Amino acid sequence: MRLEAASNPSASRRRSRAKMNGGFKTQPLPNPADRLVWREHVEAELGSLRSTLARIETAMAEDRVAVRAASGQWAAVRAASSQWPEQIGQLRAQVERLQERMRDDRGQIRDELDGLQDDIGRLGGYTLQTQVQERMINRVEEDQARLAETLAAVSQRVVGERLRTNTVIMAGAALALVSTTALLLANAPRFW
């Protein structure tokens, strides 16, 4: 909107009549140079107003865009928030399933731990039994070693006794042979 100062002769006549009727002083009509200066002054003021108005319109346009974007985001937030109860319900169901699975797993773990403790108890018993049997085996092996030594000593004595006995028998047999041979020889001329 552009404002221009224009001279209106009828308006100036009305002004002068009103002033005369009211007893006001009359002002002289501005000359064309004053009007030109006045017009430039008004144009300068209007220019700053126009630039301010343009900035305001630009800011309003930006604000409208921002409001539209915010309302779009608000609509998206509303749409998302309308889905929250359903998502929360799904999450609750998942949490309940996980808790139930954890309870089942805890029960199973307890059973397995009880089984492991039983196995450990049994293995401890087996270990003790094995240690006892190992001690017994070690004693039997020691007894066997002593028995083997004793048998070796006895067998050496027996072998020694056999040798002596065999020597005595052989000596007796040799003596008998010699005495039989001597007897035969002594009696031999008689037989021939």
Image (spheres, rainbow, N blue to C red):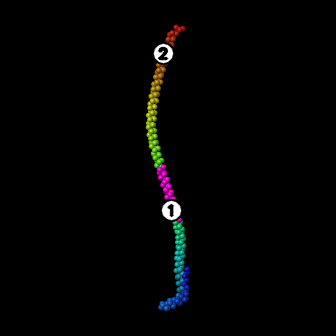
Whether residue 5 can be seen here:
yes
Q: Which mark is residue 175?
A: 2
Q: Is residue 142 above or below residue 96?
A: above
Q: Is mark 2 on a helix, strand or loop?
A: helix
The crowd level at tag 2 (other Cα within 10 Å; few <14, some 14-19, many 20+) is few
Q: What amino acid is labelled 2 in the image?
A: Leu
Stretch in magenta: 79-108
Residue under numbered circle 1: 85
Residue 161 drawn in magenta: no
At label 1, the amino acid type is Pro
Q: In which quarter of the image is the N terminus?
A: bottom right
Which residue is drawn at the image coordinates 50% and 60% (left, top)?
Answer: 88
Q: Nearer the viewer, residue 64 or 9?
A: 64
Q: Give the percent coordinates (x, y) of residue 65.
A: 54, 71
Relative image position of residue 20 (x, y in whole percent): 49, 91
Element class at badge 1: helix
Question: Where is residue 67 shown, x and y percent of the image?
Answer: 52, 70
Q: At which x and y percent is residue 130?
A: 45, 38
Residue at image point 46% right, 44% down: 118
Q: Residue at x 52, y 76 (%)?
A: 52
**Count of number-bearing discs:** 2
* Mark nearer the N terminus (1 vs 2): 1
In contact (CB < 8 Å): disc 1 and disc 2: no
**Residue 143 marker:** none
Q: Residue 95 magenta-drawn?
A: yes
